[in-house]
Amino acid sequence: MNLGIKQSPQTRTVLANGMVVLAWENPAADIVAARIFIRAGSQWETAQQAGLSHLLSAVLTKGTEQRSSLAIAEEVESVGASLGADSATDYFLLSLKTVSADFAEMLALAGELLRSPSFPQQEIDLERRLTLQAIRSQQEQPFSIAFDQLRRIMYGEHPYALSGLGTEASVAQLERTDLQRYHQAHFRPDNIVISLSGRLQSDDAIALVEQVFGDWQAPSTSLPVLSLPAITSQPVRAAIAQETQQSIVMLGYLAPALIKEEGANSGNHHTPSVSLESYTALKLLNSYLGNGLSSRLFVELREKRGLAYDVSAFYPTRLHPAQFVVYMGTAPENTAIALDGLKTEVDRLRTHPFSAETLQAAKEKILGQHALGKQTNAQIAQTFGWYETVGLGIGFDVQFQEQMSAVTLAEIQTVADRYLVEPYISLVGPAAVVKE
């Protein structure tokens, strides 16, 4: 039964078991890409179990009740397909790409992985060792150290403070039963969005999903409810002394989530309202500051002043309050100058209003990149599946473009004055320069 809306060439269907199916017909190439989103991710982890969803993603494809890891790999590789799992902050993801003739077979395999993973102990032990190696490797990378520190000082007890990989202590004590409990709680049809794009008619796509997943009934228990601590931190400066060849200077500003939940801690049943104006204006400012070789930070701090080995900015879209971040890698002796330069450029957004020409150029840049991010079937499936998973809906793509085109100089000034005032500062470098 189709309970959703239709937006040609995309359809949205809700199956009887609560699973949402998005299908985008794109016959340009004989390929079908699928992104299967579970509304989970590392936001559901405690500090003691940090890295749980990442470890689960590493072992999900390594065995089911019917097949071994080798049998799964051989089936995927025999048809030249790709299949993999990943965990992000706000969702868990199973990705699939294949030629259209093999899609039914690969979707059935994906269904088996989602519904009956076996979590072999030897695979858990192997992936835990690999994860611990990755964590130790990150502890030697100045950027990763600085970003971990920035997350901690900004988010405190909130799970956004944690690395997706977890810590050595948390990963070392994760057990098979932890994976099983996580899987049981979150992997259920009414918590899943399947997003498809490629040479597959919408009716056929829905029929295939119904064939694979239609008999999977949602449990009688309610969906888990996410209860998160408030973010109560205040901007501070934190530094880690490390004898590195470059210093990392990172400034972070707490910025709004795109989704504002109506009511306290309502889990997946929240009624979202979209704070489009603030979000879109901050996206534009972040792109203007640090996106590409023509960005303000690159031109002013690297090209003109020669301060930066690397300089950029990012503002990820999150279900909960996000980070507006600018950062630079610089020679240790330039640490103080780099910190002042970064802060000056962000402050300049408040003290030197955009001209109409600058605003229009920034809009065209971000809208062009937004369009280029939806060229392949995989990109289309990812984009629209993610919109649906976080509660924005498939119409958000058009909303975002319309709102970006409509951003005014006054809105730019308002969000800069409200959000980009006092930064959290994270420094990594030689003690003599970061402890000043």
Image: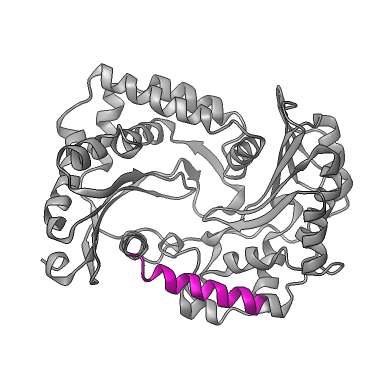
Q: Position of residue 381 (x, y in %)?
A: 65, 38
Viewer can see residue 382: yes
Image-based side of 125 in relation to 272, left or right? right
In the image, 100 versus 314, the foreground residue is 100
Q: Position of residue 190 (x, y in %)?
A: 73, 50
**Chain part drawn in magenta:** 124-141
Write the residue at 50% across / 77% down. 170
For the stretch drawn in magenta, the main secondary structure is helix
Q: In this picture, is 312 found above or below 51?
A: above
Write the residue at 50% across / 37% down. 273
Q: In this picture, is 214 found above or below 14?
A: below
Viewer can see residue 346: no
Q: Position of residue 270 (x, y in %)?
A: 57, 46
Write the residue at 85% across / 44% down. 104
Q: Position of residue 121 (x, y in %)?
A: 71, 80
Query: Does the segment drawn in magenta span residue 128?
Result: yes
Q: In this picture, is 162 found above or below 409?
A: below
Q: In this picture, is 51 found above or below 231?
A: below
In the image, 133 versus 77, the foreground residue is 77
The quarter of the picture where the N terminus appears is top right
In the image, 71 versus 231, the foreground residue is 71
